[in-house]
Amino acid sequence: MQEVGDQPVGRARQIRSPLIIGVGASPTALDSIERFFAKLTVGADQAVVLALRHHEGLDEPRLREILQNSNAHKVFGVSDGETIEGGTIYLCPPAMITTIQGGRFAIRKAEHAPGERLTIDSFLVSLAEEREQAIGVILSGTGGDGTLGTATLKDHGGLAIVEEVTSEESDHLQEANTPAAIADYVLPPQDIPEHIQVYARHLRRLDEKQGVDDLTNEGLKSSNQEYRSLKEELQSVNEKLTTVNGELAHRVQELTRATSDLKNFLESTQIATIFLDNDLRVMNFTPAITQVLHLVETDTGRPITHIKARIPIEELYDDIRRVLRTLASVERELSAPDSGTRYIVRILPYRSIDNFIAGVVITFIDVTAITRAEERQRLLLAELQHRVRNTLGVVRSIARRSAETSTTVEEYASHLDGRLNAYARTQALVTRDPEGGVDLEYLVVEELLAYNAREGEQMRVSGPKVRFQPKAAETFALALHELATNALKYGALSQSTGRIEITWRLDESTEPAELVFEWRERGGPPVKPPARKAFGIEILERTLAFEFKGQTTLTFSPAGLQCTITIPLSKRTFHTPMVAD
């Protein structure tokens, strides 16, 4: 039995109209056209009609060369009213609409602009309505032109085949308004001819079974109906497969997006994290882990025991195995021996999407700054407690000595209040800059202004830059307070005409160098030595000597009190000037 398309068939087949293969293509898809016609054998009972979407930009010499080199007996242009012959390739004319009517070509002028004429749809629809048994082929680049024709062919029992395109265009071709979404087959151009010949051979077998009587005709119709039924079932299966493929593509897209989100998260996080499988092999890690482990991308799959670390990571192996065994998280602290960096290490089970324990997740959180802050806080708290104890000791001493040197409750209350206020002012100066010391000039001015002494009128203060250490400032402030209180009660500040001159200098002729502080009063009432040594004199003479190894000289001149205080320069007492002990 001779196969259709291989050579001419017998007389009974020749008198029948040829099987028409309508091919729709884009003028820019000459590569697809060439691959299709290179494999197509046009039998004597077949005719191919090539309808281009438009002819603008067409390389016509190359197209004619492709068609002339094909396995066809003849290549003609379409003429109006021409009968369609087998063994021939027909090329539809440009700017025209070509259809089939009564086994002949019908041509009319196109009314729309190029690209909007639907030349392919027009021909395929007329072909489907003319013949129940026909083939439509849509090559790439036709856009939506050919969709209606493909659907009409299938509705009339014809075969529709569409070119399979590259992955970049696949999403577009899977849309519902494209030929690919409803075609019987989606194939590469060079594979389409084989399916055409299979279909042609099927039709030939049906023809051979066809007799000359009506019974035989009924059997042929039944076979054709069975074939159409089979096609419908195949189409239904194809639609279901298309739906499943669409769902799978959606799931793949979601998975790709989730994977991308996870990758971006791992690359952006500053937390050093590593993922290990159940055999302690590296599955993944964040870039920050390189601060802890010497890891590169090629280390994925390597055992963690083979990775060089900046910390004693071997201490974690037992913890990792315990987490895998008990599924309970573990936390511990590790330090880098070389840098002293301290980490909080957390180990948790790694659960897969189906809740299977696939390994562990280990995070390393740098807590060096936090640890150092905690240590500093402890030191500050200890220093605060020490200062509070010292403060309470000073307050108790002031209260006790004020009580011992006071004769009445009123006198005691007055002395205690003044001395505590002086001490509080000094504390305020100290807390402003605990590390910078207390300025002597500021200490003097603050104390005298507390007693309403007018700077420039009742007092004159001068001397070089000198700053006491905080503890020394507290003691010296009490001495200043006693001098100011005495001046207010008995001396220069008790009268509006009184004046106080306060100066100091650094005497470097001695060893060690000394601060010489002088307090001179004038313009007040006559001064005479006290009948007994009060607490103020005790502070000036005994306390300064004990605290600073200093020396105090009090001169009760009728013109006014004079006090000279000499204190050796030492780091324990003075913040500046810098001296060497």
Image: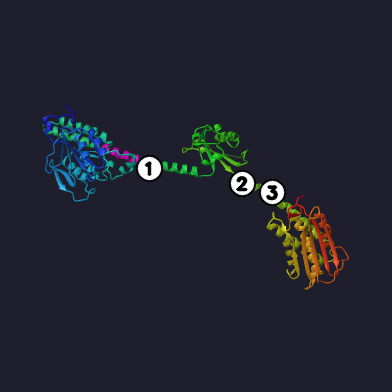
The residue carrying pointer 3 sits among few (fewer than 14), some (14 to 19) or many (20 or more) residues within 10 Å by Cα, namely: few
Between tags 1 and 3, which lies in front? 3
48 relative position to 453: left or right:
left
182 relative position to 262: left or right:
left
For the N terminus, the image quarter is top left
Q: Is residue 492 visible?
A: yes
Q: Is residue 184 visible?
A: no
Give whichever of 130, 519 is nearer the camera. Answer: 519
Q: The residue under label 2 is which amino acid type?
A: Ala
| Residue 169 x/y as whole percent | 32, 42
**In the picture shown, does residue 464 fall above or below 491?**
above
> How far is mark 1 from mark 3, CA to CA?
61 Å
| Residue 429 x/y as whole percent | 71, 59
Q: Are marks 1 and 3 in contact (CB under 8 Å)?
A: no
Earlier sequence position, callout 1 versus callout 3: 1
Q: Which residues are magenta?
A: 232-254
* Circle 3 SS class: helix
